[in-house]
Amino acid sequence: MARARTRSPHIIKANQRLIGLNGIAPDLDLGDGVSVASLVALRGHTEALLERHNALLSELGAVAHDLDESEKALRTLNSRILNLVRGRYGADSAEYERVGGIRTSERKKPVRRAAPPA
């Protein structure tokens, strides 16, 4: 299953602010390190991190898919091993119990309750 790409509302807001600031003056400096250039630099850094984040999400999705497929194959092999041991040694054997089966002689018998008197 593909993972959804992350979007940043802050980058969208920064783009809108940048358009407005460029309308005032392309080299506007408001002091205290707040300027068009600082906004452009931080927006670019944030976009780069977001792209990296989304690339990792994509890779994670591929790895998760591979893991699911591998787990399915492992589950099938485990089931086949248990069935083949039961077929070769019997369902009440020590070998069957060693590979994780429950001996038929050790299974709990269902208890049937009598119907209450009417």
Image: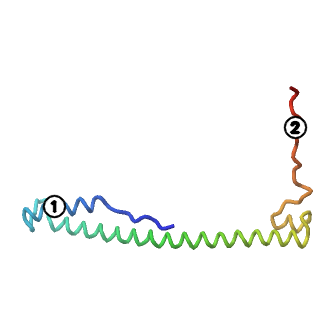
Where is residue 38, by image quadrant? Answer: bottom left
Left or right? Give the position of 24 relative to 104: left
- Does residue 109 lie above or below 102 as drawn? above
- Give residue 92's position: percent from left, percent from top: 92, 63
- Disc 2 is placed on an element classified as loop
Furthest residue in direction top, as rendered: 118
Left or right? Give the position of 61 relative to 45: right
- Give residue 4's position: percent from left, percent from top: 43, 64
Sequence-first disc among 2 and 1:
1
Q: Residue at x 22, y 61 (%)?
A: 14
- Does residue 113 lie above or below 1 as drawn? above
Where is residue 43, by image quadrant? Answer: bottom left
Left or right? Give the position of 12 relative to 76: left
Mark 2 belongs to which amino acid?
Arg
Furthest residue in direction left, as rendered: 25
Q: Residues within 10 Å of mark 2 (few under 14, many from 20)?
A: few
Q: Residue at x 88, y 41 (%)?
A: 112
